[in-house]
Every structure is written in C-alpha cells, then in structure tokens.
Image (cartoon, rainbow, N blue to C red):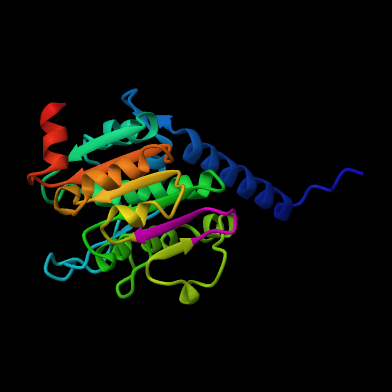
C-alpha cells in the first residue's frame, strides 16, 4: 500500500535524504569548488563537529567551541592519514596536529566498527586529555559531543559518558579509544588498529613502543615537536 502524500512525510523524507547524504560525505569526502579533494574525516571535522579552545576569553571569543580552521595543509594531512600505514609528523605549536589525529581517530571509530585506537603520551593524564579527559572534556569526547544529535544517535557510546574513565571512550559498535602512559609494556597489552604517539620525541622507550606496535597495529601515527632521540632520528633519515 502506498503511503499518502503529506507535508510531514515530505519533511521526513527530506531529513532522511539529508542525513544519508551527510553520511556519504563523511565516509568518502568530496571535491571542493576548486576541484581539490576533501577527505571524509576532514569533511566531518570541518562541517559536523567542533574543537575546544581554553583560551577563548583571552582571544575575545564568546564560546570555547570553534570549527576546525580551513588551514591549507589539512587536506594533504588527512589524505596521508587515510593512505599511509606509518606517518611521522614533525610539528610546531598551533598546527592542530593533535586535534587532527584525534579527529581522525574518532571518525575511524565511528565509521569502522571494532576499531581500537591507542593514544600514548609522556604521562597517562596527558594522553587522557586527548581521549575522554576530565574538565574540560578531552579532545575525543569534545569532538564526539559537538556532533549533531542525529550523528551521536547513529554512533552511540556503549555506556553513559559519566561512567567512562578519563582514559577511555567506548562505542556500541565495538570501537574504542584508550589512553596510555609511556612505556613499551603498555603497548604490549593490546592488539590495536591504530596507535597514535603525541609528543613522541619526549616519550621514554619510544623506539621500543614503536617496535611493540609494529607487528600488530594496522597504522602508526607519530607526532611531535622537535627533540632528540628516536623520533628526531627517524624524521632526519626520511
């Protein structure tokens, strides 16, 4: 039986079409008006969520929540994240590389069920700030919460946010993000999909952690400002 036409039915069909189109853009990306490709996770970061700026009052802003900036290197960076199994990103301050890596991780957890992302930093508290965190919420939780409500409903968390520890986010689809302190033994406890090292040049046992993750992880993402050791030597060799 064909459902009768109504304004409510038209509004519903339009809403469903808009949501499915948005999901397709999040999954696959699109070309911008100049013909350059915007990868799916970057499209999601630009149009579907927001970051958190703790210095918003000093900058004269009304809200701490800000959209991802339209920096010219972001399409290249996200394309590398999508296509390279091992990436080393040297950075300077204010490049938003940590935000980009976490945005890519959240996107991957939502789009690909069963994803496990490990984020390792010098200290567990620092790594936790990139996942759920405490107050203000961590990068991962902020990006999740600043999505449109229908996206949060499409990719629900496994348990209530207030019941999650600061170092962990778990989705109903079986994906999770886990923060770790430094040390190769921390990595050996898991069989992750993606491992992200933040400020890798300053992590003790960085080389051993990298070695422990290499046989089991599908992707290794290494980010740091300048510093001696494994990260700096690897970047110099490249």
Quadrant where the C terminus lies?
top left
Bounds of the magenta span? 170-179
Instruction: Work out whether residue 39 or residue 216 is closer to the camera in this orientation and state it.
Output: 216
Closer-to-camera residue (175/7): 175
Left or right, 231 with reference to 193 = left
The answer to whether residue 178 of the structure is visible from this angle is: yes
Quadrant of image for the N terminus:
top right
Frontmost residue, 198 versus 1: 198
Q: Position of residue 18 (x, y in %)?
A: 57, 44
Let me know if residue 173 is in the magenta part.
Answer: yes
Please say whether residue 67 is one of the residues in the magenta stretch.
no
Instruction: Give residue 52's position: percent from left, percent from top.
Output: 28, 62
- Quadrant location of residue 122? bottom left
**Measuring 32% from the left and 47% from the top, which residue is drawn there?**
196
Residue 17 in the image: state x and y as whole percent: 62, 42
Residue 50, image x, y percentages: 34, 56
């Amino acid at each position: 039986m064909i459902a009768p036409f109504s304004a409510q039915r038209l509004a519903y069909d339009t809403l469903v079409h808009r949501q499915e189109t948005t999901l397709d853009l999040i999954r696959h990306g699109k070309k911008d008006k100049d013909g350059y490709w915007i990868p799916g996770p970057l499209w999601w970061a630009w149009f579907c969520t927001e970051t958190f700026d703790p210095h918003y009052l000093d900058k004269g802003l009304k809200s701490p929540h800000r959209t991802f900036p339209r920096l010219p290197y972001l399409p290249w960076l996200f394309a590398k994240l999508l296509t390279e199994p091992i990436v080393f990103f040297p950075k300077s301050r204010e490049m938003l590389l940590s935000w980009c890596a976490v945005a890519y991780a959240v996107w991957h957890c939502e789009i690909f069920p069963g994803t496990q992302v490990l984020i390792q930093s010098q200290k567990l508290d620092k790594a936790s700030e990139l996942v759920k965190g405490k107050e203000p919420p961590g990068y991962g939780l902020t990006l999740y919460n600043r999505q449109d409500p229908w996206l949060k409903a499409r990719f629900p968390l496994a348990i209530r946010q207030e019941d999650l520890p600061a170092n962990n986010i778990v989705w109903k689809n079986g994906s999770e993000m886990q923060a770790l302190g430094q040390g190769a033994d921390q990595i050996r406890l898991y069989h992750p999909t993606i491992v992200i090292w933040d400020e890798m040049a300053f992590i003790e046992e960085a080389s051993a952690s990298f070695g422990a993750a290499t046989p089991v992880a599908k992707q290794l993402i290494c980010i740091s400002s300048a510093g001696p050791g494994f990260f700096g030597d690897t970047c110099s060799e490249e």
